[in-house]
Amino acid sequence: MKLPEMKDEAFLRLAREEDNCSISAGSMQGVFRKKGGPAAQASVPTLIDESPEAQDFFRTVASNVGRYLLFPDEPFTTLRPGILATSAVDRQNEIIAPACLEDMAAQINENSLWMTREHNPLLGIIGRVLAAGRFYAPKSEIYFVAIVNGFYDLDRLPTFRDFGVDISLPIRGAYDPPETERVDAARLAYSPHEIPGAAIDEMLQQAPEFVARDAVLRLRKSAEPIPILTVLASVWLLTSNPFSKKFLERFGEKSGDAAISFLSWLKDRVFTKLAQLNRKTLFVLETAYKGCRVEFVTSSTDPAILIEATRCVHDAAQSAVVLVDKLEHLGIQQLVYEYHLPTKQWLPLHAATRRGGVISNRAALIALDQLDQAAKEEKP
């Protein structure tokens, strides 16, 4: 693949013109609310001009792009430099500590940062951050994270079939974890800028004992992020089907009771309160398996739909375990399933891997939606 060409100075000039201070989901640790009104922020060109080290960073990446690719044919069409975050007061009147910015840059360089539009997992991955570094603007007295974004050619993204996985057929499996991994554990995660803390407190009322009472705060800095409520759960809990006779015979009534209490809590507390927010919100069940973050996303706050989706998520979770196993050789880091409302089934949407890049099923879902629409139009 021919990489996008960019001369060092042209790349640096583009960096000065950018203002893409948008932070992906992460911990709120190291983020502090400033007392009083927001202070004036230095502009992006000023920060870069004040830091020779940042300028050298952009020049180095522009001159050695190949070093930052995950694999030789990573399908970038555009490289765009800019600033991800600063220690100045932001739109939410918050300050990110310099140490947090340092950690942010280190994590990006170690694990990559996959980019989505407005942090919405249903919109698919559009690229990733190739390189990041924390720098200091002495005159403005501001620390900042400089980055180089790479945007993919979305028409060239491989499909699951390209890697030998036919997702048009049911992906079945029976996850049988070791005894030490049979853990009933769950925790809420949210951004306080999207969902009121009081609503989270109400959701946690009468939660099962294995649901943590301290929710995880996630940082999503964006112009208009869609609210996301996430339930972090063990893979054991999501793959459990407490209504299955086979499950009860195999693992006993105690495990079945835990799974039932989890579903009841979601139905009676979480979904009810989510509907009362009267705002479009994504509901996500998230788990981790073999180092891969797996998300099951429902784009509805209708309690009936959420109950319906959650009752059958165990099949999707079993499917996800099989899919991660099949793609493990690619270094899979992220897998997203969508609850497809027209067909009332969970479908894999996309995956992000270190050795195969982004794998997308978007085209197949569009075709499925078109068939569904055509069927509706044929009805008298």
Image (spheres, rainbow, N blue to C red):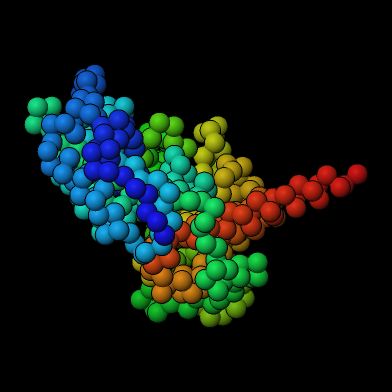
Image point 47% across, 37% down: which residue?
Answer: 226
In this view, the residue in front, 118 or 185, is 118
Q: From this view, report whether residue 251 is shown above or below residue 364.
A: below
Q: From this view, report whether residue 110 is shown above or below residue 121.
A: below
In this view, the residue in front, 68 or 268, is 68
Image point 52% across, 46% down: which residue?
Answer: 123
Q: Is residue 346 left or right of residue 221?
A: right
Q: Quadrant of residue 12?
A: top left
Q: From this view, report whether residue 307 is shown above or below residue 242.
A: above
Q: Is residue 155 left or right of residue 126?
A: right
Quadrant of the rendering where the C terminus is positioned: top right
Q: Quadrant of residue 244?
A: bottom right
In this view, the residue in front, 245 or 78, is 78
Q: Quadrant of residue 162?
A: bottom right
Image x and y of residue 261, in percent: 51, 59
Image point 75% across, 51% down: which residue?
Answer: 372
Image x and y of residue 371, in percent: 75, 53
Q: Is residue 124 in view from this perspective? A: yes
Image point 40% across, 56% down: which residue?
Answer: 2
Quadrant of the rendering where the N terminus is positioned: bottom left
